[in-house]
Each structure stands twice: as C-alpha cells, then as structure tokens.
Image (tube, helix red, strand yellow):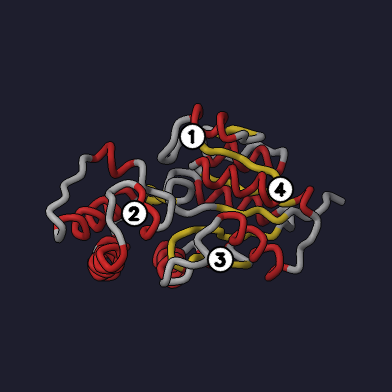
Amino acid sequence: MTEQKLVLFDLDGTLFDTSEGIKLCYRHGLEHFGISATDSELDRVIGPSLYDSYRDYFGLRGDDILQAVRLYRELYSAEGIYRLRMYDGVEEMLQAVGRKGNLIGLATTKPHVMADKILAFSGLKQYFDVICGANLDGSMSDKFQLITTCMMKCEFSERSRVYMIGDRFYDIEGAKTAGVHSIGVTYGFASGEELTEAGAEFIADSPAEVARLITGEQIKI
C-alpha cells in the first residue's frame, strides 16, 4: 500500500490566478499616499504578506502600513476577493491527490478568513483536510510556520512524506526550512528561474504535472 502523504498548496498563483483583485486592492491602498505602481511592480508583491510588501517594496512605515492594509482589505472583502480565476486542471489535480488517500492542506500567507472564503466560494473547500493562513495582524505569515502548523494540525510528523507546492521562492524556502519536499509551479506568478534558484526539488508546468509528481499517475484535464 502506498504511504500517505501530506500535500500542502499555496493559494495565489498555485490554485488561482488572483492577480486582478490583488492589484486592484494594492493600488487602492497606495493611492491614499499618492503612490502609483505598474503591473510589473505589483507582480512582485503577490505572495508575501501585505505588511511586508507595503514596507519593503513601497517604503511605507508604521501607521501608514496599517492604513494601507486597512484600505486594501476594505476593498478586497467587498470586491477584490471575487476577481480570480481557477487554473485549468486544479480541481482534477486535487481529486487525483485525494483519491490516493493523501491529506491535502492549504498553507497561504493570505489571511485565514479570506482563504477559507475563497475555497468555499470556488467549491474547492471540500478537498482540504486543513487550512492554514495568516492572522489579520500579519502574524503567522511565514511559510515555515504555516507548513509546520499544518503538520501539527494533521498530527503528521513524517517530513519525508510532506510536499509544499507553490509558485514563489517563499514557498520553496519555507519548505527547505521545514525539511519537507518542494514543488515549484511555473504557471503562477514566478519564473522557473526564480524557483530553481530558490532550490525547488521539482518543477511543474501544470496542475496535471503536480498530480503526476505526487501520485505517479497521469490525469486527464
């Protein structure tokens, strides 16, 4: 019998193309301070926490960060959260991974309440055994913390059978720190070069390829 795995997925750029809603809301937060941003500049901030991005990429500090995050979330909750597209083959991928008796988890820096709402809205929540997201105050936004929290909640301690799947170097570095396997996906918001340089063990160009790497079987999309 095949040994059970714990398979963890990022959300933005791995399950969904959420770029339209995220960019809309980032701009809403920045415009309050008279800051404009191009699409390419905003591409960089899809993945890390809002607090880190407003500080590290746009130079906000202190209460200004809190104000930008408040404005972002105000619009995101009402409108931005629904501006997304599930990548082709994602549901079939989750079905294939689950059919093998594996546990499936979400490890995202998006706030837990938002991630849970997206999975419910999209119909994917039924496939997940555990959902781990950041807290609204920005804590629990480190991928290592999210991975290890998922493992703890699932009471799954065998790191050699844990896989983290994501599209940014944060996902890969978090997996390395946690001592688990990593699969970088190139159909999201980062290049294969970014993922390779971060040390991804495997690279997948589609959800079908992710399913094959986990289950050893081809799936039809």
Of 204 and 94, nearer the camera is: 204
**Among the 4 quarters of the image, the one containing residue 104:** bottom right
Q: Amino acid at mark 4?
A: Val
Q: Residue furthest front?
A: 62
Decide which of 10, 3 is in the foreground and name it.
10
Looking at marks 2 and 4 on the same chain, the residue that comes earlier in the sequence is marked by: 2
1 or 3: mark nearer the eye: 3
In the rendered structure, which amino acid carries the disc numbered 2? Arg
Q: Quadrant of residue 137?
A: bottom left
Relative to 55, is 179 on the left or the right?
Answer: right
Q: Which residue is mark 3?
A: 132
Location of mark 4 (residue): 180
Q: Earlier in the sequence, mark 1 or mark 3?
A: 3
Residues at marks 2 and 4, CA–CA distance in whole angstroms: 29 Å
On screen, residue 5 versus residue 19, left or right, reads: right
Earlier in the chain: of badge 1 and badge 2, it is 2
Most foreground residue, 184 or 91: 184
- Between circles 1 and 2, the one closer to the viewer is 2
Sequence-first tag of 3 and 4: 3
Place of residue 123 in the rendered image (x, y in percent of width and height, measured from the top left): 46, 64
Q: Circle 1 is placed at which residue position?
A: 186
Say whether marks 3 and 2 touch (CB < 8 Å): no
For residue 153, above or below residue 22 = below
Which residue is depicted at the point 27% across and 61% down?
A: 80
> Which residue is found at the position 47% from the left and 54% from the top?
11
N-terminal label among 4 and 1: 4
